[in-house]
Each structure stands twice: as C-alpha cells, then as structure tokens.
Amino acid sequence: MTHMVLEEKQSLEERCNQILKNMEASLTARDRVGIQDFVLLDPYTSESAFLENLRKRFHENLIYTYIGTLLVSVNPYKDLDNYSKKQMDTYMGVNFFELPPHIYALADNVFRTMQSEFNNHFILISGESGAGKTEASKKVLQFYAVSCPSTRLLNNVRDRLLLSNPVLEAFGNAKTLKNDNSSRFGKYMDIQFDHQGGAVGGHILSYLLEKSRVVHQNHGERNFHIFYQLVEGGEEDLLRWLGLERNCQHYSYLVQGDCAKVSSINDKSDWRTVRKALSVIEFSEKDIEHLFGIIASVLHLGNIKFEPDARGYASLNKNQELHWVSKLLGIPSQVLQQGLTHRKIEAKTEEVFSPFSVDHAIYARDALAKAIYGRTFNWLVNKVNESLANKDSSRKTVIGLLDIYGFEVFNVNSFEQLCINYCNEKLQQLFIQLTLKSEQEEYEMEGIEWEPVPYFNNKIICDLVEEKHRGIISLLDEECLRPGEATDLTFLEKMEEKIGGHPHFVTHKLADQKTRKTLDRGDFRLLHYAGEVTYCVVGFLDKNNDLLYRNGKEVMQQSKNVIIKHCFPSTEPDNKRRPETVVTQFKSSLVGLTETLKSKEPWYIRCIKPNEAKQPGRFDDVLVRHQVKYLGLMEHLRVRRAGFAYRRKYDIFLQRYKPLCPDTWPNWKGTAAEGVRCLIKHLGYKPDEYKMGRTKIFIRHPRTLFATEDAFQVCKHKLATRIQAKYKGYRVKGDFMKQREAATKIENCWRGMMARKEREKRAWAVKVIKKFIKGFITRNQPACVENSEYLAYVRQNYLTRLRDNLPKTVLEMRSWLTPPPIMQEVSKLLKKIYIRHMVGKYVHGITTQRKAQLLLKAQTSSMFKGKKENYPFSVCRPFQDTRISVEDINIKVLQMIRHEHIKYSVPVVKYDRNGFRPRLRQLIFTQDAAYLVEEAKIKQRIDYSSLKGVSVSNLSDNFLILHVTCDDIKQKGDLVLQCDYLFEALTKLSVVADKLKCIKVVQGSVRFDIQPGREGFVDFKNGQESMVYRAKNGHLMVESTRTKSR
Ligand SMILES: Nc1ncnc2c1ncn2[C@@H]1O[C@H](COP(=O)(O)OP(=O)(O)O)[C@@H](O)[C@H]1O
Ligand SMILES: [Mg+2]
C-alpha cells in the first residue's frame, strides 16, 4: 500500500514537473511570440507589456492568450487554419495548460468540469461589436458538436443546435459599420448535456432585437440578412409567388444604407444554407411559406407610398404593394388600407376612425413592419426552441453561451445603443462581481491574507441607468407614460433636472465650454465603463413606447397567415392597460439573465477588436489599449496573479480527491478541513501553492490542481479496476461455487453409484464366501446343492494346480500334490496314469545300452534292495562294462583265458585265508569261471559250476566271500575279497554265471572254508570307523560305519 502511495506521489510530482516542463518548453520555443498566459507575464502591472504580448502574438496569428482560465481572443479578421477537426481532437481531454491557448481548450475544460462536478456553467463572451463574439460562440458550439459522444438521436440534436445558428443569424444579424455580421439581438443559448456528456437539447433566449433596422438603416449598413438572401437567392417560383423582383434596389427598406451588396457576404449561398437549416429544424413547408410571406410583406409594406388627398390626409389608391401584402398575409386589402391610413379612436362608447396625415401613415406603416418582423423573430426563436427541446425529464447539466451584442459607439447613437451599452454595463458588472469583487471578498471572508486590488466598479453607471425613480430608464418611462405633451426633448430636460449632477452624465446644456462643442442640443452623453457615448434623444420615446396603433394590431389579428395569427393573438390586452415599455422589458429580461448566470459557474472569453477597419494584420495600439482597459483585463490579471486559480469547499475537495491518500480513503473521520490538510500533505503541496481558508482550500496555480486531477484520474482507474476485479472475483467465485456444487453433486452421484456397486460386489462376495464356507463345511458330504459348487471349485482348483505343478520326472513323484479328500481317488488314478505316461516317455527315450545297464541295475536291486546297507549308494553309480581294460591284464593271463571270453574284470583286495593279509588282485569273470589274478599269475580259478555261493554282509562294507566246492585238499578254499564295485561285480557275476540264487546277504558273520575241513570266519559289524583287522578270536573283523539311509 505504502508503495502504491509513494508511486502515486511520485507520479503526481512528475506530472507537475511534466506540465511545468511542457509549459516552459512551449514558452521558450515560442519566446519570440510572447507568453501564453498573462499570469506568467513578469511586469504584470504594466499595460504596455500586456499590449506588447498581445501584439506580438497577434502578428504571429496567435490570437488566443490566457489570463489564468480567462481567454483573451483578438479578432484576426482572416481565416486561420486552427479550427480543424484535428485541432479539436488535439484539445480534447487535454489539460488546459499543456497546449497553446485555444478556445477549444476552454470549451473542453468547461465541458470536463461540468462532467466531473455535475454542475452548470456558462461562458460569457464579451467584447465590442465586431470583436469576434459570435464567431467564438460558434466555435464553442462546433467543438461540442464534434467532441461530445454521439448517437443517431444526439446527432439530430447536434445538427439542430448547429443549424439554429445560420437561421437566427439570417433573421437577427445585419451588416453594421462595425461588423458585416453584427448580431442585432442578444442571444443566450443553453446546451443541455446528459450525464454521459451527450448534447441532448438546447434552449435559446433572445434579447431585444433591433427592430428599427427593419425600416431604417444608417449609411453603410444593411437591413437583416434574410431580406437580401430572399431577394438574391430565392427561387424564381418563390419570388413570383411572393410578388418580389430579384433586385434589392426596388425595395425602399433595403436601400437606405446604400450598400445592399457587400463583398464579404454571399447572400445566395447563405440563402441555401438557411433553407436547408429550416427543414432540419423541422419547419414545415407551410411554416416556411408563411414565414417568407411575412418577409416579403415587410418589403412590400416598405414600398407602400401615401399620397396626400385633398384634405392632406394620407391616401392609398390602387396600390400594387398593398395588394401583395393583402395576399401574403391573408388580410382583405380594404381592411389593410383602412388600417394603414386611419387611426381608431375610442370616444366614450363609440369608435371613431380618424385619418392619418402622410407622415403619420408612414409612421404607422413602419411601426407595423417593425411589429410584424419583431414578433415573427420571436416566433422563430420559439420554433427553434421547440425543435431543440429535450422532453426527457432526467437531470441534465447545461453550458450556457452568452453572445450578446457588444458595446457600440456610432456617430449617431440612439435608443438601441443605449440598451445595448446598458446591457454591456450589466454584464461587466456581473464580471466584476464574479471575478474581482466577489473573489476579493471571498479571500477576506475566508481569512486569507490579501492585498486588495483596486478596480473600477461600474455600479455607478448601472445605477445611473437603472436606478428606480432616478435612473435614465425610470425617467424615460415616466416621460413615455405621463399624460400631456411629452417629447424627446422634455425627456432630455427631465434628465438634466434629475441627474444633471451625475459625474457620468453630461448634456449640451450641462457641459463646460469645451465639451459643449462636441455635443448637439438634443444630445446627452454617458461615461460608460467602456468609454463615452453620445446619444441623440430623437426617437427615444417612440422607440420605448413601441406603439403600434390599435387598429394596426386589429388588422393583423384578421390575418390568415398562421405565423401572424400566432404573433397577434386576439386575446392580447388592448392598450387600455399599457404594456411595459421596451426598456423596462429589456431591463427585467437582463435581471432574469443575470440571475440565470449567477446560478452557474462562469467562464470568460474576452474578445478584442484589433482595428476599426476589419483588416487583418492591423493592430491598433490605442484601440486595443482602450479595450484592455475597459474590459478590466489588467485588474483581472492582478487578482489572478495575487490570487488563487482554484478554490473548493473542503468537503467537496475531499470528497473528490480522497482516494489519493490512504488516510482519507475510503472515509475520513475528522473534519473536512483536517482531511484536506492530511490529503494535501500526502500529495506534497508546497506551502506557497495553497492556502487554507475558513471553509475552502485555495490553490494558487492551475497546474497543481491539474496534477492532482491527473493523479485522481489515474487513481480512479485503479480503483475502478480494483472494484472491477472484486466484482469479477465475486462473479467468478459465484461461478466457482456453482461448479463446485455441481462437482460435489456429480461426485456424490458417482460415489453413490460406486458404493452401490461395491455393496453389490460385497453382497455377491458374501454370498460366494458363504457358499464357499458352506461348501467347505459340507465338503465331505455327498454332493448336494450346497457343496456342489465348492467341490467343483476344489476340483478345478486342484486340477489346475496339479497341472501347473506336475513332477518333472518319475523320481519326483513324491512331490505329487496332495489331493483334497474328494480328489483322492482321482489323484491316485491320475498319478498312476501320469507315472505310466512318464515311464512310457522315459522308456521310449532310453537307449539299448542304457536299457541293458538298467536291467542290470534292476537285477542288483532285486538282489540287494532293502538287504544291504550301502546298496542305495550304489544305485546312482552307473555300471561299466569292466573296470580293468584288456591292456591292463597281463598278456600271459590273457593268453591263458582268452578262449573263455572275458566278461568283466575288477580290481579287488584279497584277504589271505590265513592271517588275512590284504593283497591287491584282479578279479576276472569269463564265460566259464572267475579268476583271481596277480600280475601274470592266475592265483585261483573258480569254475562257475564249483561256485557254491557268494556271501555279503548286510552292512555297508564291500566284502564278498566266494564259496567254492572243495573236494580236493589241494584245491584252494573260499575267497575273501573286498571290492569297491561290489554291487557291479556281483551283478555281473550273477548274470555271467547265472548264480543269482546263490548270492546271499548275511548278518553277523560268515563262515568260510580256508581249505576243506578248515574253516574261518569273517565277522561284520558296525563301528565307529571302517576298518578290517584280525580279531582276537582269529576271525576277520570287518567294521563299517553305518551309513545314513538316504
Ligand atoms: N476567430 C476568428 N477567425 C477569423 N475571423 C474572425 C474570427 N472572429 C471574428 N472574425 C471575423 O470578424 C467578424 C466579426 O465577428 P463577430 O463574431 O460577428 O463579432 P461580434 O459578434 O463580436 O460582433 C466575423 O464576421 C469574421 O469575419
Ligand atoms: Mg455578434
């Protein structure tokens, strides 16, 4: 947070510096063309310096200069190319002081202030006639038309706002000596904006049209533009229908000034603009027809000539003009004629028509023309207002544009000039009040240290004109209304009598010697704020009375022309009750205007006229100096210089800028003043940049405020983003919650489904297990429903298991899977089958040699299996054909027994029959006999026929005793032998000698014959270790270790 604040603070300062830099940059860049804001003028009290700056800039076509937020504009009298759309864009939304001064900058600033503060404003455009007020007001209007947000509907309003101008100018402007397009009426225009800044409507108030111009123009001046436009531009048909000729010289109302044609005015093209504008502002064809009927009638009226009849009264005979007026206004010509030549006098109960003199008739005609034109003008303004009116009742803010006739001094000044100049006095007074007086009073009220700036207060002149009972207006009204012979001169006398001593009033009679020379007898002079003006009293009373003879009015009431009908309603009060005089009406309308303006925020454009000749590039020092003076620009500058550009009530200021400081945002607890103090401390305002008043903060330079405002704009966006983010977050959270809810719901359903599945599975499992258990329990019962499945399972299970675990060889049959009870029988059968299968397989795969070998082994088995202890060890030792190869048998021996075929031979240990000495011998089996051989000697031959038997012990020794039949004493006895291949040798012997039956396994001891009649014994026993020795009893003792059975 502090970081952010620091950033903001920094950017505020940076912004401030940036603005300053920009200002300085543009200032230095344009140094030679002076300064853009008089506030920055160094000798700010010097009128010459002020003028110099204006002139410098003027010569560089820089017609705009600021005094703070007041815009000074010097009429260039030439088209400058700085009013393009691009220029408008440049100035849109840019701070006042960041770009060179421009009317667009002011307009934009007003608009944005209105937008942000949502209040009403007005732009007071002042300056003398021809200074550029009307142009300025048009520029402002155009700016709004382009810059405001637009929609189709708004575009409509915009077009009407824009096009109301040429229409009103055509009917209300005229060429004067001062200005070729001089506004001859005052105009105050409200532009209404909705809260989005769209221009949604408008309203125009018009003030005192200079009607006298309709019937009379001074030399070098023209009537209202519309007359010339119609005559010059009107279509042939239209002119024919109106009875007009395309020649201004034919109309006496158009030729008095002797300048119907002006080079700066193009009546033809203006006509087209007006015609188009009228249709856009929704004038119906009928309206237009009647409107131009009236304009034409005025021209015709002007041409009506009266002849004195025999008695000297005015007469009108077969007047062509009369005919046209009658046709165009829809009034019988008889009636019209009567109205123009007679006056109706009411004498008690009856009405008498008294004829006019020619002069009177002319007067009445002119009065009628003025009345018609004047009222039509008002109708026109109302009509425009109808078209601009916004019917929607929602609250709107307005920007008022006041473009009122400027201060005017002609050679001969009349009633109109008095009104115009009085109006200017009033506006000047308002300006003084709003800027100089009230400003200084405010400082005083707020307790701000202040050195008062003296200024000329024109109240004294305003009072001179408008004061009740004593003012010129009162005196004039008095003269107009009093019975008896009142004339312009009696009015003058009255003024001399009542206000003769006033310092701002002088007449021929009152003047000193020197001044008197400049005055005529019928003149009076006012020292206006803007200068001296000499008025000629001639016509004052008439113009003020604005009398239209009563039957003139009545004649008009008969008109068929809708506009005239509308303008002369039959309900209008007759002249029994006198209507308010012109000047009084004007005065009260000015009071109304001032009230309207006072309720709004003022902005000023002060227009200055550089020369009287309407020439571009000419800067008349004296003329300009005079305007600078009476416009109070110097005083304004001094107040601005010393004062504060901006002030706001603490609460309003705080309310707007509180987001800029963490302590004041979002709410400040203390007083608004403390809050503001805290806020500006945070923003880093320097002590000389502001002052704290009693109820308001005063900020000296606009740039400080602009920097603050810029920071606020940035901050506003940040805040908006934050709020937006919060809102989005809230929305997203909502969405998320919904999604989560949905997800939970789905999850719940899913889980439910899964749980149900699981439950089903479990239920199924329980059922299966139950069945299984039941099956298990009843497994031994005969097959029934309850155990059938279980048994099937057991069966299958056993069979598959058996399949996977079948013994690989017959020898492994012991690993045959133990069958469950019900499978015992099956198992047995299977085992048998399997064994047979295995055996078959084995047998099929066996070689003949191996078969022979195995047959021998089987023989061995049959002889010893289960009988001799060490037999099992022999099983795995394969038999060989012989243990002694033929080469190892002595050749002699071989020669002796070759014929008998040696079948087998094996090394043995022979134990002597006496003494039991062990001797290594070879034992050879032939077809017929067994031989004991020692090297080359056959030690003993035992014919198989004489072999009685063979004894072996049941223990694990390797002894064998061959028992022989011994008939002969010389014959050797039984043989006691030890042979490592005992079983092999014995088996071979049993086969070769076919002595299977005579091989005996004995226990304990074996008796043998040493020689016939002499016996010996071999005792067998198990001992600790294997050993052979002669026992004490003379027996051969063979001890063998007990072999563990496999
Ligand atoms: N900004 C301007 N640029 C160019 N010409 C201007 C400008 N302002 C005024 N003029 C010229 O001066 C004439 C008088 O201006 P206008 O606004 O009618 O004066 P005012 O209304 O003060 O009597 C215009 O007709 C125009 O020729
Ligand atoms: Mg004007």
Image: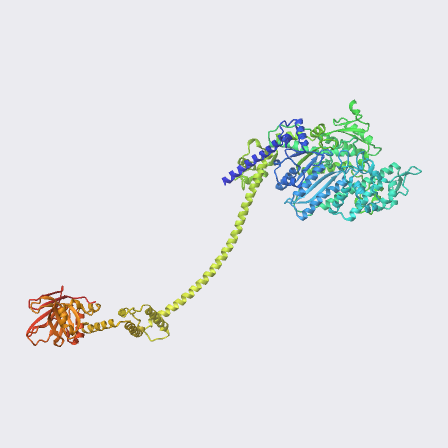
Is residue 558 visible in the rendered structure shown here? no
Give the residue displayed 49% in from the left and 55% down from the top.
740
In this view, the residue farthest toward the right is 310
413 above or below 847? above
Residue 612: percent from the left, percent from the top?
74, 31
Is 764 on the left-hand or right-hand side of 681?
Answer: left
In-front residue for pair 779/817: 817
The quarter in which the C terminus is drawn is bottom left
Residue 438: percent from the left, percent from the top?
65, 32
Q: Quadrant of ligand 2?
A: top right
In-front residue for pair 78/370: 78
Residue 356: percent from the left, percent from the top?
88, 38
Q: Quadrant of residue 971?
A: bottom left
Residue 530: percent from the left, percent from the top?
72, 30
Q: How many marks?
A: 0
155 above or below 541? below
Q: Quadrant of residue 41?
A: top right
